[in-house]
Image (spheres, grey):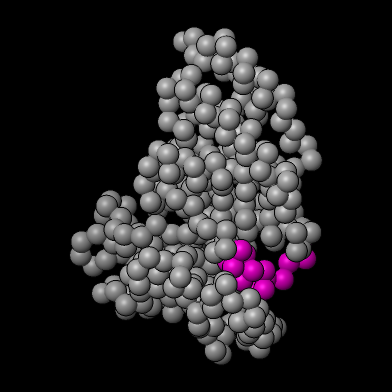
Amino acid sequence: MAQEKIEPLFKLFDESTTILQQAVSNSYLDAFIENADNLIDDGNVQIEDGKPDQQAAKKLQAIYQTINLKNVTPEEIRTVVQLIMLKAIKQDAIQSNHQMTPDTIGILMAYLLEKVSHFTKPFSIFDLSVGTGNLLTTVMNHLHSVTKLKVHGYGIDNDDSMLAVASINTTLQHQDIDLYHQDAIDSLDIPQSELVVSDLPVGYYPLDDNVANYETRANKGHSYVHHLLIEQAMNYLKPGGFGAFLVPSSLFQSSESKQFVEWIQKHAHLQGLINLPSELFQTKQAQKSILLLQRQGPNSKQATKVLLGEFPSFKNKAEFASFMQEIDRWVATNLSV
């Protein structure tokens, strides 16, 4: 990735966002959304109730004229938007469940989906907790670069600010993604896809009446939202399709895990559960894993040996490369037709 493109482009986005933030007295995130909308609209500065004033508008237009996105790759755009979001998270003190999936994790999830999939024609992928679109576009960019096939995406989220960033992210990257502002637990207006990827929210889902038809709902009290979303994801996967989910490492240690495992055995193949390096998390309780599920279908099968283990430290390149080779061998042994 061309760092010489990313750094100056980030500085231009940051400078224009800061000018707009001061001119309209808004949060950094809201200023970025408006700033990016201006850029998408051919650099036309939106003025409402006299804001931004004429002086700020001239500064913005001068910066917009220096921004050329024609020779910037989708990955470079994604990285710039990610850097902007990291600043917004820090400056606006955005809550933790709005923070982005780190690139290292997104690349690992993309790698897993690449290895278990064998596409010969265009395919689709969806994310039930799309947020800013960072994880979904990371995976789509990777899969497109490997397969050279057209990839269509679907993203669902109930947070309008995050979805606005996702819209900017996908538009600037020229990604073929449809975004939906809704509760992903409700019925979705998307077709079945070959793949799903998601960094799942963790906790309880508050609307008990909405989950009456879910097999993974709790027998009493609120249900785990990550259980519900995994069940929902299987409903919108084609038979034999794969899902990679970022989940708590304690997923199968909760009081509801027995019921969840029974649901998996009925509808999916649990193909893998890989712990992420502990160095990525401040506490053991916060540690996460990648759960690899496959929807049951006529051409799917349960792996003889489930892919289990822990990714070595990213700092140890030799051990990490060796572990990736183990994944290749596991796929060849357990999933190859």
Residue 112: say if magenta. yes
Residue 69 image point, x, y percent: 73, 36
Q: Residue at x 58, y 27 (%)?
A: 16
User: Where are the magenta residues, as a range?
Assistant: 107-121
Q: Residue at x 46, y 46 (%)?
A: 157
Residue 71: say if magenta. no
Is 242 in front, or is 326?
326
- Evaluate whether residue 186 shows in this view: no
Q: Quadrant of the C terminus?
A: bottom right
Q: Residue at x 59, y 37 (%)?
A: 168
- Evaluate whether residue 60 shows in this view: yes
Looking at the rendering, which quadrant does residue 211 occupy? Answer: bottom left
Is 51 in front, or is 182?
51
The reply, left or right, for residue 108 in relation to residue 216 is: right
Residue 83 image point, x, y percent: 56, 45
In the picture as drawn, the residue positioned furthest to the left comes out as 220
Looking at the rendering, which quadrant does residue 278 occupy? Answer: bottom left
The reply, left or right, for residue 68 in relation to residue 187 is: right
